[in-house]
Amino acid sequence: LAKTTQPISMDSYEGQEVNITCSHNNIATNDYITWYQQFPSQGPRFIIQGYKTKVTNEVASLFIPADRKSSTLSLPRVSLSDTAVYYCLVVERGKLIFGQGTELSVKP
Amino acid sequence: GAGVSQSPSNKVTEKGKDVELRCDPISGHTALYWYRQSLGQGLEFLIYFQGNSAPDKSGLPSDRFSAERTGGSVSTLTIQRTQQEDSAVYLCASSYRDRGETQYFGPGTRLLVL
C-alpha cells in the first residue's frame, strides 16, 4: 500500500507563502490526490484536488510532479486563520490513505 | 443544503458497554465513510459504503466494530464491548458517488470509554 508521509509541523508568519509536501511513494497512475484542512473540534474540510501538474483554486495551489510520488500544497499569503492541520489523501488500489497531518502554526 | 450530521456529539460510556453512533450523509450522496481519529492523531479509515455494493470493511480494527447503512442513507457504527482504547473521535463523511471525489465530513462523535 502507498505510504504517505508529511512533516509533522510547520511554522510561518502572516503574509508568507507556505508549502507543505506529502510523499506517496506507490500511488497508482489513476488516483487523485486530495488535501484537507482541519480545525480543532471540527471535521476535515476539502481544500484542493489534483491528478497531475498544477491545480489552482481560490484558496490554494497543488503541484504534482510527473512521477506523482509527491504533492505540494501551496498556501499563498497565509493569515492567522490558516492555523490548522493539513492532510493529504490518496486512493491507491481502492484503499483510502491519509497522511498523518501537518500542523501549521501561523504567527503574527 | 444540509451537511453531514452525526449524533451524539459526545458519548461517555463504561468499559464493556455497547455504543451506537449515527451518521446522516448529505442527501443524494451514495458514498459514505467512517473514520477514527485518536487524540492528536491522523484519520484512520474504518469502513466505506458505496451504493448497493458490499461495503469495504478492511479498516475495521476488530470484530467488535460493525456498521450498516439502511436504505442507502443513514449509517450506524456499532462498537460492542467497548474498551478504553476505543476512545476517539469518530468521523463520518459522504461523497457524491465514490471515493475519488470530495468528501464532506461531519463534526464527529467524541467517544470516551471509562
Image (tube, coloured by chain):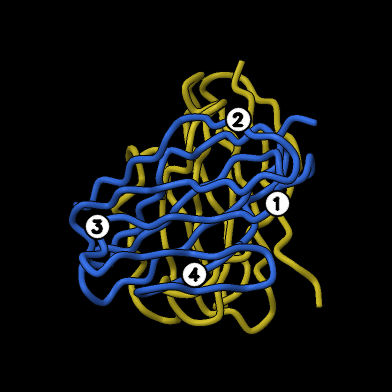
Chain colours: A blue, B yellow
* Of pointers 2 and 1, the one earlier in the residue sequence: 2
Question: Is there CB contact under 8 Å for labels 4 and 3?
Answer: no
Task: Give the label, 4 or 1, closer to the camera.
Answer: 1
Could you tell me residue B12's position as x and y percent? Answer: 70, 26
Pointer 1 or 3: first along the chain: 3
Q: Chain of mark 2?
A: A
Q: Which picture quadrant has residue B10?
A: top right
Tag 4–tag 1 contact (CB < 8 Å): no
Label 4 – label 3 distance at C-alpha: 15 Å
Q: Secondary structure at mark 1?
A: loop
Residue B97, compared with residue A25, is above or below; it is: below
The secondary structure type at the circle numbered 3 is loop
**Is label 2 or label 1 in front?**
1
Q: Is residue A13 left or right of residue A3?
A: right
Where does the image place residue A23, in percent across and percent down from the top left? Answer: 30, 48
The residue to which callout 4 is attached is A49
Q: Are marks 1 and 3 in contact (CB under 8 Å)?
A: no
Measure the alpha-carbon separation of dots 2 and 1. Answer: 13 Å
Closer to the eye: label 3 or 2:
2
Of residues A7 and B88, which is closer to you in this image?
A: A7
- Pointer 3 residue: A69
Residue B113 x, y percent position in the rendering: 59, 22
How far apart are the alpha carbons under marks 4 and 1? 20 Å
- Disc 1 designates what residue? A77
Q: Disc 1: which chain? A: A
The picture places residue B29, in percent across and down from the top left corner, at 59, 79
Taking depth in this image into account, of B32 and B79 the one nearest to the observer is: B32
Query: Which residue bears the numbered disc 2?
Result: A11
